[in-house]
Structures are given as C-alpha cells and as structure tokens.
Image (cartoon, rainbow, N blue to C red):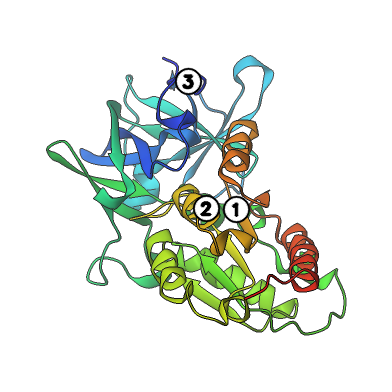
Amino acid sequence: MAKKDKNKEGILLESGTNEIEVMKFRVLGEFYGINVAKVQEIIMSEKVKPMPHANPAVEGIFKPRDTLITVINLAYYLSGERIENGPRDLFIVTNFNRMTVAFRVQSIEGISRISWKDIQKPDKTISNGDESVATGIAQCEDQLVTILDFEKIVAEIAPETTIQMSEIEELGDRPLCDCPIVIAEDSILLRRMIDDSLERAGFTNLRDFTNGQEAWDYLSSIKDAPNLYDEVNLVITDIEMPEMDGHRLTKLIKTDPRLKKIPVVIFSSLIDEQMRKKGKELGADEQLTKPEIGHLVMILDELLAKFIQNKPEE
C-alpha cells in the first residue's frame, strides 16, 4: 500500500495555499494524523529484530529492500504500556530530517485535505509545554484528529538526531549581532533550542512567534512604518505550523512590495527536492533541513551582511 504520489497534481505541488494533506490512522482506538509530506510509504508490518539497550518504544529494526529501518511502537510511546501487536498492523514509513523511520499503527483511515487554519494548537489544559506531543488538533470531516509531533518523538528517543549545540561551539568565538530576526516555529522544544543556539552564536535580537499567522500579523503591523528595515532584517520559518504554514508566510512576504526585500530562510524537517522547488518558487532566499543549526548560522551571517550592505531605502 503506497502513499499518494507527490508528483501528481494536487496540494503538494501548489504553492502557498496554506493547506495540508493529513493521513489519518488509529492507535489504541484513537484517531491520529501525520502530514502526508512526511510519509514515504505504508506497508504491512513485518518481523522486527530487537536491538539491545534500545529505548523501550523502539521495537527494533527491519530491512525492506536492503535498507535498515528503525521501528517505533506508537502505542507504547503514547501509553507507556506494552500492547500485543496485531496481525494486521501497518508500518508508516516516514522520511524527515534526512532520516527514515517506521511507526507501527493499527490501521490507516484515509487522507483529508484541510487548511492549516483548521488545525488548532492544544491549550495548556492538555498541552504541558515541552511535554506536548501534539502539534495540533484537526477537524477532519466528523472526526477530531490529533496531529502528532513526529520530530519530537524521534528527538526524545534519539536526542542525537535533533539540534546539537556542539555545532555552535565548533564555530568558536563570534561577534555579537543585534540584527532583528523574526522566528516562526510552533514547537516549543525546537523554538527554545533554536533560540539557545542562535543566542550562543551571538544573535541577540530574536523575536519568536508560534505560527505563521502570528508572524504575519506582526509583520503586517510594521510594514508601513518608516523604520521597517530597522525592525526586521530577516525571517526564519518552519513549514508545518497551525493557522498559517511557512510556505504561505513566505508567499505573503515575497509578494508584498516592502516586505519582499527582507530575506526569508525556511528551516524545516521537510526539505527535500520537491519541497526545495516549491520554496524557491515562493521566493525563499534559503532553505535548510533541520537540524543543521551550524549551517543555519553561516547562512544568517551571509544574508544579514548582504541585507545590511544593500539596505533598502525607507
């Protein structure tokens, strides 16, 4: 059972529509969702070879088509209880952050195409800061679907796969930079890690927003100000965010007569050849794959130096 072909006409080739295709699946009888852009394929579950000293949520590895793939048991990760695997379980084979990981689920319930505006961030009564594994709650037809933060799941199980402060340390002593940078990132954990890394790299003027809509509201509020280019010198955005995604944000910035002069960097786990083409069409100045934080710092240096040198007339 293969996933929808990304090359077919549809949402994944449209630019800046602020829409997402959500693949719905069941774990422990509940509905969950994943962005189709993360899914490589769906296959029937296979025999898995256990690995010693692995995280309890890691079942082990299997080797389809000569490729070793780690299998994470979502039921165990979500409940902390060992549930007997079913004969009709499926593996959702994902690809993000340049990694291929399989997740065991009970069933696939279809694909829904919705707007990011229809995905709401869980409030604090059910979302405990960094502990939340839900990136949002989506209304898909008559079902409420929890969109899981798969990057966070993998980062918890294998911390070495996420942003590493060691990459910043390797850059050595750096001068301070007070250029104002806008950051749109919905994950509390990743936003904090990005901020910590950039501050360690000498960037002292960071302004955070939890989604593209908040970032756009801020940019809209200052875009007619006479000192606009003193208020923002660069924008960093994730792609997957409730309310407004990073592609829509990029499109809005790059089609605005004044804001379009501000460099935009897309920093996302989804950057592949297809997404890179899409971001380029929207006008993104650079696109980087998480967790390349050291590379991000070097790109910021280049783009900010160029922006300051050729600062637009107010």
Determine which quarter of the picture holds residue 26. top left
Residue at the left extreme, as displayed: 142
Q: Label 3, on which residue?
A: 46
Along the viewing direction, whichever of 123 and 209 lies nearer the viewer = 209
For the residues bearing labels 1 and 2, Cβ distance under 8 angstroms: yes
Which residue sits at x=59%, y=64%?
A: 235
Residue 303's quadrant in the figure? Answer: bottom right
Tag nearer the camera, 1 or 2: 2
31 is higher (above) or lower (below) than 93 = below
Name the residue beneath numbered marker 1.
Answer: 266
Mark 3 surroundings within 10 Å by alpha-carbon count, few (fewer than 14), some (14 through 19), many (20 or more): some
* Mark 3 vs mark 2: in front: 2
Name the kind of residue labelled 3 in the image. Answer: Glu
Helix or strand or loop: what does disc 3 sit on?
A: loop
Q: Which comes before the other along the chain, label 1 or label 2? A: 2
Identify the secondary structure beneath mark 2. helix
Residue 277, above or below 80: above
106 left or right, relative to 304 = left
How many angstroms separate mark 3 from mark 2 (CA)?
41 Å
